[in-house]
Amino acid sequence: MHLKDRVAIVTGSGRGIGFAIAKLLAEHGAKIALVDINKDDLTKGKSEIESLGGIAKTFVCDVSDWENVQNVVKEIINEWGRIDILVNNAGITRDNLILRLTPEDWDLVIAVNLKGAFLFTKAVARQMMKQKYGKIVNISSVVGLMGNAAQSNYSSSKAGLIGLTKSTAKELAGKGIRCNAVAPGFIETEMTKNLSEKAVQSFLDSTPLKYAGRPEDVANLVMFLASPESDYITGEVIRVDGGMAM
Ligand code: NAP
């Protein structure tokens, strides 16, 4: 029980990679604040974690809404008295070629994927500073490192998360707060379920290990970055991508 008495917030944890992270942190003893925009998924996730003996509370929240984010963080502090781990995982795609991409879909993806992570970081920073301890993990992507056709909005948000990670790491290191990013490659979730066969094949062709990752592959690394074993690591970006972006 590595994370006993630790309190963790995982955004976008109703399903997919976020839920796998929440479940693993809970298995290691952390109390989990499940944050997502989708209420039904949250309810399902909470009962699965509780059925395994974990502790979880649910918070319906749009990560791009500052008031909503502040209220969630206040509620968690009132309830559990501290915040040790923040995983900024909520993310969306609105893929299109630049000529067809609407300014609205640019703004939406940046608002959820990048501004959402900034808002949660801002909202937890004071509490973590008071504790002189905190672990922040941002879920970026290999396309934030490499770019990708038809994903200018998404890849910009994911590259932006790397800048946010390094700036947060530098700014808050003196207060005992570590911030790192994880860059997954092609992971099987709802987000990638509707990709065309051609797109899937092209991802697999560019992955030396030749198979898709599972949400648990990402969760294992986040668990390490959230735990004291990684305390001397900050401002780092680690790929979980079967070798895709090397
Ligand atoms: P997913 O299955 O689509 O899950 C994302 C979750 O975030 C969903 O539950 C979604 O709710 C929620 N969400 C969306 N907008 C939100 C908002 N404004 N506020 C709060 N929650 C919101 O995606 P995933 O594949 O697990 O991806 C998780 C993270 O990993 C994302 O940041 C993604 O960019 C990143 N990633 C994924 C891959 C991959 O191959 N899957 C690769 C690299 C990086 P709804 O169900 O209502 O949409």
Image: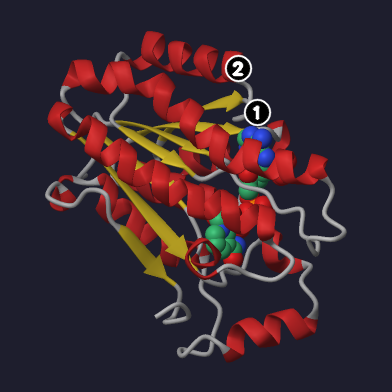
Q: Position of residue 110 (x, y in %)?
A: 64, 42
Q: Position of residue 199 (x, y in %)?
A: 73, 80
Asked if residue 106 lies left or right of residue 3, the reply is right
Amino acid tagged 2 = Asn
Q: Position of residue 240 (x, y in %)?
A: 41, 69
Q: Position of residue 49 (x, y in %)?
A: 48, 41
Q: Is residue 201 visible?
A: yes
Q: Earlier in the sequence, mark 2 or mark 1?
A: 1
- Image mark count: 2
Residue sitting at x 45%, y 74%: 241
Label annotation for residue 68: 2
Residue sitting at x 45%, y 44%: 22
* Cβ at disc 1 under 8 Å from ligand 1: yes
Q: Nearer the viewer, residue 107 or 55?
A: 107
Q: Is residue 82 visible?
A: no
Residue sitting at x 51%, y 45%: 89
The quadrant in which residue 128 appears is: top left
Label annotation for residue 62: 1
**Callout 1: helix, strand or loop?**
loop
